[in-house]
Image (cartoon, rainbow, N blue to C red):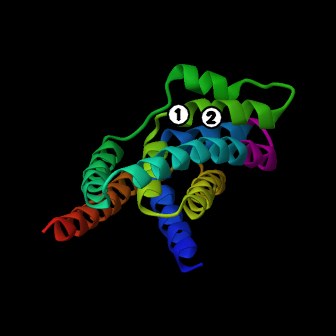
Amino acid sequence: MEGFLVALAVSFGVIFVAELGDKSQLMALTFATRFRTVPVLIGITIATAVVHLASVAIGYGLGATLPTDWISLVAGVAFLGFGAWTLRGDKLTEEEKQKAERTGKSAVVAVGVAFFLAELGDKTMLATITLATQYGWFGTWLGSTLGMVAADALAILVGRLLGRHLPERAIRYGAAVLFAICGLWLILEAVAELT
């Protein structure tokens, strides 16, 4: 049970931070201006659960077949890369904005499909794969899914309360620093195991 809770907490925290300032938050906010909040969150949750289930399957399989010390080293470098990616920032393309603004018969389906496609190959998917190599699959899946939904729900809530005056630069820098700390921690653990 302790391993599950660690996987849940670490995955929630890492994915929540990774999602701050991500284009998915911008999509969530855009969808929430067109549709009611609950269907938007349901669509986000379904899409995230599916993408992250595939991510943990890949990561868990890699963790079972590769030596853990090298996985930690690669994961640490990956987290440093995620930090740099976060610093660079994300913007919605015009095409992504248009998809988010389209109305359809079902807001849940529209949001779910858009989020599913947007998350394939995104840093949160790659971070979930990385986490699953280190922790149990179920805790990682649940934590990463809840972390992403919580971050997107926060974006909707804060966006509605404060309008478009969010300190995007501060959020981006803070998330990048947290990724760098996680990456350095994993690298130090790997070096300790290798020596």
Q: Residue at x 49, y 44 (%)?
A: 58
Label 2 is placed on what type of residue? Phe
Residue 102's place in the image compared with 31, above or below, is: above
Q: Mark 1 packing: few (<14 Cα in 10 Å), some, or many (20+)?
A: some
Q: Is residue 167 visible?
A: no
Using the image, tell me which numbered label, if any, was put on residue 120: 1
Q: Is residue 137 magenta?
A: no
Residue 83 position in % (x across, y down): 31, 51
Q: Position of residue 177 (x, y in %)?
A: 30, 60
Give the residues in magenta: 34-43
Residue 165 lies left or right of residue 193; in this view the side is right
Front-most of residues 151 and 9: 9
Q: What residue is pinned by disc 2?
A: 116
Please report the residue visible at 29 percent of the width from the left and 59 percent of the height from the top.
Answer: 72
Disc 2 from disc 1: Cα separation? 7 Å
Residue at (76%, 47%) from the top-left corner? 42
Give the percent coordinates (x, y) of residue 44. Answer: 68, 44
Question: Callout 2: few (<14), some (14-19), or many (20+) C-alpha neighbours within 10 Å?
Answer: some
Residues marked 2 and 1 touching at CB (< 8 Å) = yes
Q: Is residue 5 above or below residue 69?
A: below
Left or right relative to 81: residue 53: right
Mark seen at residue 149: none
